Image (cartoon, grey):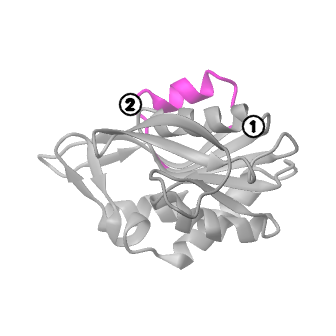
Amino acid sequence: MKILEERILKDGAVRPGNVLKVDCFLNHQMDISLFQEMGKEWKRLFEGVNINKILTIEASGIGIASIVSTYFGNVPVVFAKKSESLNVDGEVYRTKVESFTKKRVYDVFVSKKYLSPDDHILIIDDFLANGAALNGLIDLVTSAGATVEGIGIAIEKGFQPGGDLIRSKGVHLESLAIVDKLDAETGEIAFRH
C-alpha cells in the first residue's frame, strides 16, 4: 500500500535490533485518516469473505481494528487482554505470546462470551515479526472452535520468519507494507514489491 510505505519512509525511524519506530502515526499517536485508508484496502483484499468479528491484541491493534470494523459493517472488535482485571468474569480462552519489541512473554486471554464456533474472524494487528502474537491469536480462535478467515497486518517485517510461518498454515494473510530491510546505521528502509 503506497500511502503506508510513503508514511513509513517519511516518519518512521530505524532503531538497533530491527526495530521500526512508527509510533507517531501507528501505535502511540494514531493517524485516523491513514487507518481509514487501511480499512478500505483490507475490505478490498477480503472482499466476499464472511467476517462477523475482528480480533486483535492489546494495545496497539485496538485503534486500527476499531476503524477497520467500520468497513466490515461495524462488526464487533474483540481484543485479547494481557493482564487480569476485576471486570473479566467467567471462563476465558488463554494462550501465551512473546512480544518481539518488549522481549517478554504474556499470558493473553479472551472471555469465552466473545468467541464462539459461529464466529468468522478477521485478525488485525499493527506488526508481524516472528509471528508469536498471531500464533497466539490463532490459538485462541481455534480453542473457541471459530474460523480464522484472514489476517490483516499493517507492517510485516519480511526478513523475519513470521509471515512465512503464518502463510505456511494456509491462512489468508494480507500485509499492507512488507519491509525487507532495515538498516539502523543508515536509516534505510526497503520494501518488498
Nearer to me, 37 or 131: 131
Q: Position of residue 2 (x, y in %)?
A: 51, 60
Q: Position of residue 131 (x, y in %)?
A: 48, 33
Query: Marks 2 and 1: in contact by CB < 8 Å?
Result: no
The residue at 46%/50% (across/down) is 82
**Between tags 1 and 2, which lies in front?**
1
**Quick one: SS at disc 1?**
loop
- Residue 112: say if magenta: no
Q: Position of residue 102 (x, y in %)?
A: 28, 46
**Amino acid at pointer 2:** Gln
- Residue 157: say if magenta: yes
The label on residue 144 is: 1
**Side of 103 relative to 193 (left or right):** left
For the N terminus, give its image quadrant.
Answer: bottom right
**Side of 174 relative to 21 (left or right):** right
Which quadrant of the view contains residue 79?
bottom right
Q: Position of residue 85 (x, y in %)?
A: 49, 59
**Quick one: SS at disc 2?**
loop
Which quadrant of the view contains residue 43?
bottom right
Question: Disc 2 marks which residue?
Answer: 160
**Amino acid at pointer 1:** Ala
Nearer to me, 151 or 60: 60
Neighbor class of circle 1 (other Cα within 10 Å; few <14, some 14-19, many 20+) is many
**Real-space Cα separation, disc 1 to disc 2, in angstroms:** 29 Å
* Residue that sits furthest to the left in the current view: 185
Whichever of callouts 1 and 2 sits on the residue coming sooner in the sequence is 1
Neighbor class of circle 2 (other Cα within 10 Å; few <14, some 14-19, many 20+) is some
Which quadrant of the view contains residue 117?
top right
The residue at 30%/45% (across/down) is 101
What range is drawn magenta here? 155-172
